[in-house]
Amino acid sequence: MALIGPSVMCADWGNLQENMEMLERGGVDFYHFDIMDGSFVPNFTMGPDLLKALRPYSGKAFDIHLMVQEPERYIGMFAEAGADWITVHAESKVHLQRALQYIRKLGLKAGVALNPSTPLSALDYVLDDLDHVCLMTVNPGFAGQAFIPSMYRKIEDLRKVIDASGAPIDIQVDGNIGYNTIPKVIECGASMLVCGTSSLFNSADLEANALQLIEYVNKQSRKTS
């Protein structure tokens, strides 16, 4: 079954503890934290202190998406704050293989994120160092953007690359993942869904939203299994 992770930047930041408690009761699988530096993307979000403050409220995986220019500066910082998975962008100023190996050396799962226009060839020589690939299905920086239709084919193409490699790599999709896009992204091969304003956070009752979304995702996953 595809895993569901709320995008924390879409939560009510004045009530983050309450939001997380509702999502816990709803049964989400992981929490996705978009870390933005105002340079790699035109927005700022959160830092390791927020992660550390929220860590006691869930035993689920904390998925850290470093949307920053120099991710290697922050890997250790977020690992210490309670990260379980860390994803770096191929387009950032990063020694990609070294960063992935460092993440794994810390005992965490390592991922690479690709912007919509970045070709899959960026992954050619790092597949052995990956646990997941995060495909951005919108241009990164802000919530609420429209899904880019050509990303369905990119998910399919990545699924073929992973299957051919034999590596146990998950495909995460991030950007307008809602009821209208979930069936096809799962059919194309996605196994981790980052969900925000178009699904989990579209009303205040996050527990009910999560329960409804999980039921829907499980139904779609069974269709493709």
Image (spheres, rainbow, N blue to C red):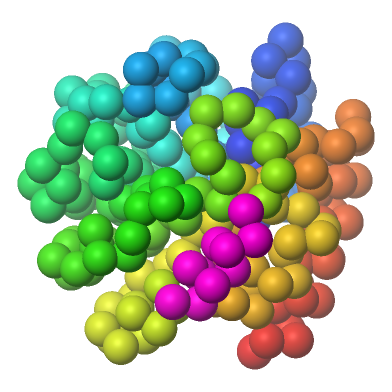
Residue at the image position 76 percent from the left and 76 percent from the top: 220
In the displayed structure, 189 sits above or below 105; it is: below
Toward the viewer: 156 or 198? Answer: 156
Q: Residue at x 36, y 33 (%)?
A: 66
**Residue ranking furthest to the top:** 14
Q: Position of residue 182 (x, y in %)?
A: 72, 64
Main secondary-structure element of the magenta-colored stretch = helix
Q: Which residue is pictured at 65% across the width and 79% down the height?
A: 187
Vertical order, 206 against 149 (above or below): above
The structure residue drawn at horizontal position 25% and vertical position 35%, both measured from the top left corner, is 92
Q: Which residues are magenta?
A: 148-157
Residue 124: x and y, percent? 19, 68
User: With 56 as the anchor, is 80 left or right in this view?
Assistant: left
Residue 36 is left or right of residue 187, and the answer is: left
Q: Which is nearer the eye, 60 or 32? A: 32
- To which quarter of the image does residue 37 belong? top left
Q: Work out whether 204 lies above or below 12.
A: below
Residue 207, above or below 223: above
The quadrant the C terminus occupies is bottom right
